[in-house]
Amino acid sequence: MMFDALGHGRGLRPFAFVMAIFMLGNVGLAASGGAGWLIAAIAAANIALAGVAVGRRLAIRDLPGRDRALRRIEHLASHDTLTDLSNRAHFSDALDDAIDARKPFALLALDLDRFKAVNDLFGHGAGDAILCRVADMLRAAVRGTDIVARVGGDEFLIIQTGISGPDDARKLANRILDTVSTEMDRARDPMAVGVSIGVALYPRDGADAATIRRNADIALYRAKADGRGGAALFDRQMGRVARERRTLDRELRLAVARNELYLEFQPLVAAAFGSVVGYEALLRWSHPRLGEIDREAFLPVAEQTGAIVPIGEWMLRQACATAATWPDTLAVALKISAVQLRIPNFVAVVRDALDRAGLDGHRLELEIPEAALLRSRGRALQTLHEIRAAGVRIAMDEFGTGPSWPGNLKAFPFDKIRIDRSFVAAMRHDAAASSIVRAIVGLGRSFNVPIVAEGVETEEQRRMLLDAGCPQAQGYFFGRPGKDPFRSSAQRELSPDP
C-alpha cells in the first residue's frame, strides 16, 4: 500500500503500521471477544489503514486493500473459525431478521450422536475433522438463502426460508439424515457419527426467537429419545411433556430433603434352587401430590439434569446402612449411572457410605451400565479400579447392549455379568436372543465371571436360562421388590446431608 504523509515524506507512520498488522493478525480474537471488542478492532484497523493520525493528514491510495481487510475481519467476527459456518451471534441476528420479515420458515436443531465418545476415543483433532465434514454436508443440503450455524461443540442450527409447509422441513431433514448415514457408515468407519434433528415452524410453533428455539430443542430431545438418528417435528403434545419434565426436575431436586425417596429390595436367587444369595436395591419415589412415580419416568430426568448425583449418594448410604443389618452372607447391589461414575469424588462417596454403615466392601456390588465405558473410558476404568481396591464388587450391567461388549471384559476384571432383560424377554420367540444369551454365558465361563439374568418372569424363562447354563437370576418369578426383608417394620432411615 502507498500513502502520502504530507510534509513528512512517503509511507505510513510506524504506529499506524503496527496497529494495522496487529489488528489483521489477531482477527481471531475479534471473532470471539464480544461485540464491544469487535467494534474497537474494526475502528482501530480502519484508522490505521486509512492513515488517520493525530496532527497528521494522510492521503490513502489503497482503499480496495483496506476494504478487503475490513471484510475479512467482519467475516471472521460472524463465522465459526473451525467450520466457517455462521456463529451464534450471526445466527441470532439472522433469526431476528427472519421473524421481522413475518414469512414462514423452519428452524432445525441438530445434534451429533456419539460425537463425545468419538472425540474422547480418537482425540480432538479427529473430532474437529468430523465437525468440518458434517458442516460440508449441511452446506450441500441447504439452499443459498438458508442459514447454517454451529452454535456449540456439536450443535448446529438451520434456518430454512421460503417454505410452504411442514413437508419442506421434513424433506430437508430427511436429506440431511440420508447424507450423514451414507457418508458416516459405522459399519466401515469407527469414527462415524449420526445426527438427530428437531424441527419447529414459524409462526406455528413460536412467534419469537426464544420460543421457537426452545420448541426446536424440545423436538430434538424427542428425536433422541425415540432412538437417535431421526427427526421430529414439534407438536403441542411435546410441549406438555416438556413442562411435565420440568416439573419432575424441580420436584426431584427437593425429594431427598423432603424424605420422599425410599428403597425396595428384590431378591437375587440361584436359578436352579431359588435360594436367595443377595438383594438389589431399587429406588422409589412417593410424591405427596403426584403419588408413586414410575422410576422409568424420573430416573432419565435425574440423569439428564444431574439430580442423580445427590440422589445417588443418598441411595448408596441408605443401601449400605440397610445391608449392614442383614446376615453377613448376603450382599446388596445397586445400579450406578454413567453420570455418577464421572464425578471426581465418586470413589470417596462410596468409601464414605461403607464407613458410615460399617459394611464390608465385599458385601456391596455396584452395577455399571456398559454404556458408561463409551465416554471418558480411561477415567471410568481408573475409577472402577479404585473402587474395587476397597473390596467392592463390580458388575457389568445391561451386558450385550453396547457396541464392544467382548472388549469390555478384557478392559476390566468384572466380578459379575448381568444379562439385559430384553434378551430374556425375547428368548421364547427369538432364536437370535437365545443365541446371544448362550454366547454371554460362554463368555462368562471363559473369563470365570458369574452370570445373572434379569427380568425372569415365568417358569419357562427360568428353564431356558438353566438350559443355557445361567446360574443366577432375578425377576418377578422369584419375588417382587419389597421393603427391607429383615427389618420391614424398623428400617433405619438416614437423614440427608445439609
Image (cartoon, helix red, strand yellow):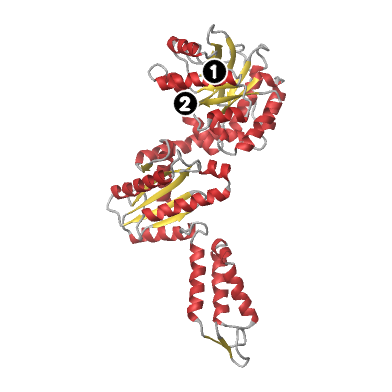
- Kind of residue sitting beneath label 2: Asp
**Other-residue count near label 2 (Cα within 10 Å), few / some / many at <14 / 14–19 / ≥20:** few
The answer to which of 43 and 409 lies nearer the viewer is: 409
Percent coordinates x, y for residue 8 in the rendering: 63, 91
Residue 208 visible in rendering? no
What SS does tag 2 mark?
Answer: loop
The answer to which of 228 and 192 lies nearer the viewer is: 192
The answer to which of 214 and 267 lies nearer the viewer is: 267
Identified at 61% across, 93% down, the residue is 7
What SS does tag 1 mark?
Answer: strand
Dot 2 or dot 1, earlier in sequence: 2
- The outermost residue toward the left is 164
Q: Name the side, left or right, on which 374 lies relative to 164.
A: right
Measured Cα–Cα span from mark 2 to mark 1: 24 Å
Q: Is residue 103 above or below residue 303?
A: below
Dividing the picture into quadrants, the one containing residue 389 is: top right
Percent coordinates x, y for residue 102 in the rendering: 32, 59
Numbered circle sitting on residue 294: 2
Percent coordinates x, y for residue 490 in the rendering: 62, 14
Numbered circle sitting on residue 452: 1
